[in-house]
Image: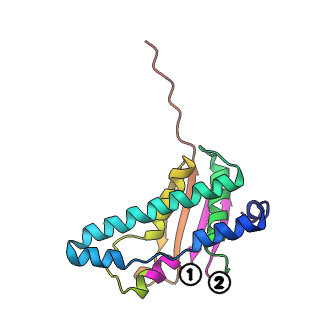
């Protein structure tokens, strides 16, 4: 959400933007695949993306003064802000708020996908960005239904996802 980003000090926004946009090398994954199995390399890469997402969101939450668990509406605000930091150029992607707790995301120039393409690494069998978002949700302590609608990897114009946030159910303690 633009308002969340605008509420932060400028130097903090720039630090967050650099962190979210950092392009980390992936050649280690190709090396791992050649020494072992592609499946091992793929799983290690996706674990790394998920952990990176968790760290990214923890930093954004700390900067915004938000603690976990967050409400579905706050989760939508944070994820929209994260996408704005990750893809500040409007040509790269867009986030549409469908309701208080639901987003439609379209990414046309994904840094993760571009990095994989540059390294000619065809071993990735799942979206690194999807796994990064799973780290975001873990950091926020919220459940999200993150449905992939299209993927650039498969020739679509953009990667699109529908993200619906839900408050985890609270179960009463059993009485003895």
Query: Marks 2/1: CA distance?
Result: 7 Å
| Residue under the image location 55 percent in, 82 percent down | 109
| Residue under the image location 62 percent in, 46 percent down | 70
Where disc 1 sits, the SS reads loop
Q: Which residues, given as a range, are shown in magenta?
A: 91-115
Q: Is residue 100 magenta?
A: yes
Question: Could one spot residue 101 in this view of the protein?
Answer: no
Residue 171 position, x and y percent, is 50, 30
Quadrant where the N terminus sits is: bottom right
Tell which circle, 2 or 1, labels the residue nearer the N-terminal end: 2
Q: In the rendered image, which quarter is residue 104 located in?
A: bottom right
Give 121 or 150, whichever is nearer the viewer.
121
Give 33 or 15, whichever is nearer the viewer.
15
Residue 121 position, x and y percent, is 34, 82
Residue count near mark 2 (Cα–Cα under 10 Å), binned few <14, some 14–19, many ≥20: few
Q: On the image, numbered disc 1 is attached to which residue?
A: 108
From this viewpoint, which residue is outermost toward the top?
176
Question: Could one spot residue 48 in this view of the protein?
Answer: yes
In this rendering, position of residue 173 left or right of residue 63: left
Residue 40 position, x and y percent, is 26, 67
| Residue under the image location 49 percent in, 57 percent down | 135
Quadrant where the C terminus sits is: top left
Tag 2 near tag 1, CB within 8 Å:
yes
- Is 170 above or below relative to 83? above
Q: On the image, numbered disc 2 is attached to which residue?
A: 91
Q: Is residue 130 magenta?
A: no
Residue count near mark 1 (Cα–Cα under 10 Å), binned few <14, some 14–19, many ≥20: many
Q: How many marks?
A: 2
């Amino acid at each position: 959400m633009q308002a969340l980003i605008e509420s932060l000090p400028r130097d903090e926004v720039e630090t967050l933007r650099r962190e979210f946009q950092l392009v980390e090398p992936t050649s280690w994954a190709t090396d791992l695949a050649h020494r072992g199995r592609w499946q091992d390399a793929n799983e290690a890469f996706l674990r790394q993306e998920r952990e990176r997402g968790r760290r990214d969101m923890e930093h954004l939450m700390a900067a915004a003064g938000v603690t976990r668990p967050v409400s579905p509406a706050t989760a939508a605000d944070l994820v929209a802000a994260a996408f704005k930091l990750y893809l500040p150029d409007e040509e790269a992607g867009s986030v549409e708020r469908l309701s208080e707790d639901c987003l439609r995301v379209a990414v046309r120039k994904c840094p993760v996908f571009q990095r994989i393409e540059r390294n000619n690494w065809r071993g990735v069998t799942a979206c690194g960005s999807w796994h990064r978002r799973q780290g975001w949700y873990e950091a926020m302590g919220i459940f999200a239904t993150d449905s992939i609608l299209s993927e650039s990897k498969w020739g679509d114009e953009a990667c699109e996802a529908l993200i619906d946030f839900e408050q985890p159910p609270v179960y009463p303690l059993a009485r003895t």
